[in-house]
Amino acid sequence: MGNNLFSVLISTIKSRFAAIMSKLRLWLSWNYVRTRIIGGIRDFFYKLLDVKPKHKNDYFSVFGWMVSKKLAYAGIIIVGVLSLWYIGATSKIFDKLTANGGMRTYSYNSVLLRLAKDKVRIKAESGYVAYEGEVSKGYVTGEGSLYSPDNVLLYSGSFLKNRYEGEGSQYYKSGALQYTGNFHDNLYEGEGKLYREDGTEEYEGGFFSGMKEGHGKLIDSGNNMIYEGSFASDEIVYSELLGKSADEIRSMYFGKQVLYEESEDLGSDSVVHLKDINALYLSQSDGSASDDSGKATQVVVLKNSFRSGMNEAYDIEELKQMLGKPIYEGNSAVILPEAIAINVLNDNRRTINGRVDMDVTEIYSDDIVVNSIATDYPVYVYTFKRGSLVYSFVCKERGGAFQFYEIMDGGDTDSDSDKSA
């Protein structure tokens, strides 16, 4: 009797818990969990895509158009899901491509480029690989190389936000080295070397805003230094020669030169033509000097353009805008430095009124005695004062273009320092 009662009790308990255990096994089975998750997602998207508005508050008003809020939210979520899928899928593809040490390649306008780090390749709009190197936050930043459509290296070195910055080398379209040194904001700035396309060095020294600036050296095609001194706005600071003796100038200029000496009947002045830098200077004896050595009192620049800072002038009106009102203008007969300058220029092209008649005796090819010059050869001169210097521009007639200019010491100083050649 007792055993029967115990058996009944056990059976009753088992029957109660059997239902619970059956439900637990069902809830913990993968098929049940998957079915519930898929069903939940289906219900979510069903409700999400049920975009039919039921009240006026279910609309956005956009430029007079009524747009369903649910439709807008659904669009945002769908775009987000597709974007995440695209990034994930393409990342897996790129990971496979770079698994063996390869380099990722992006189009220049790719969204993925903004997420890229380290070294990559970037294709230009036309499809060629324009860049290979480091990137950061969507910018070309770090060390890299830039190429032309013909796969010719154009630049190799440091970049900062898509611009040349720091040390680098720039190349001609032919592939020959053009410049090596420091850059700032895509321009030469700092110390560097400039090369001709044939590979010979042209200049070594300072640069600023893409132009020669500061101390530098000019080098000819035979790799010989021809000038060492100061530069400004891509030009030699010719005024630096003023007041120097012939020996001091020879320590700066190493190129070809021709000496023109006045005969005893004319005086004791001499003019030296510095052929490789397109200039000449007038040397006059200083009677007060113990060695009576000549000093450069006038420099003539054989160029028909004048630079000051970022500006360049080719005629008198442009000069007036740059230098202000002239302190003198008028007709003049040529003097010895001007006569030599005019004849040197006429050796290459006819200028002003042709050659100046001169009676000379050529002792050597680089040593010429001037016996006399024509006194009736007319020129028109404009003279400007800037800082401590006086500039005279020699023209054929009033107005128009000038053919060359002269620099002299004005004898006093201004607060404004002279920054022109």
Image (spheres, helix red, strand yellow):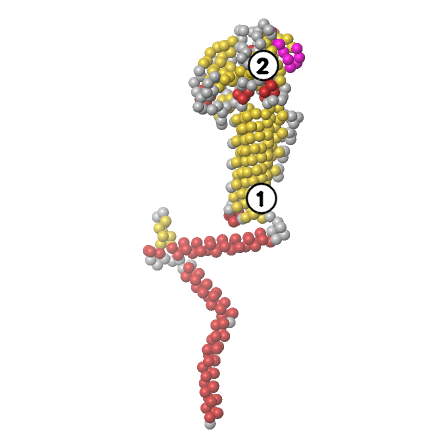
- Nearest the camera: 316 or 281? 281
Magenta-tinted stretch: 363-371
What's under tag 1, amino acid-wise? Gly
Give the residue at the far top of this rendering. Answer: 265
The residue identified by callout 1 is 133
Give the residue at the far bottom of this rendering. Answer: 1
Residue 174 appears in which quarter of the rendering? Answer: top right
The image shows residue 39, relative to residue 355, as above or below, that is below
Whichever of labels 2 and 1 marks the residue nearer the N terminus, that label is 1
Give the residue at the far front of this rendering. Answer: 290
Residue at (63% x, 33% y) in the render: 176
Residue at (33% x, 56% y) in the render: 57
Q: Is residue 170 visible?
A: no
The image shows residue 264, relative to residue 45, as above or below, that is above
Residue at (59% x, 43% y) in the render: 132
Which callout, 2 or 1, points to the residue nearer the camera?
2
In magenta stretch: residue 325: no
The image shows residue 196, relative to residue 144, as above or below, that is above
What's under tag 2, amino acid-wise? Asp
In the rendered structure, find residue 291 and report the number of the disc placed on it: 2
Left/right placement of residue 194 relative to residue 32 reads: right
Image location of residue 393, percent across then percent down: 50, 16
Image location of residue 119, percent across then percent down: 58, 46
Residue at (58% x, 48% y) in the render: 104
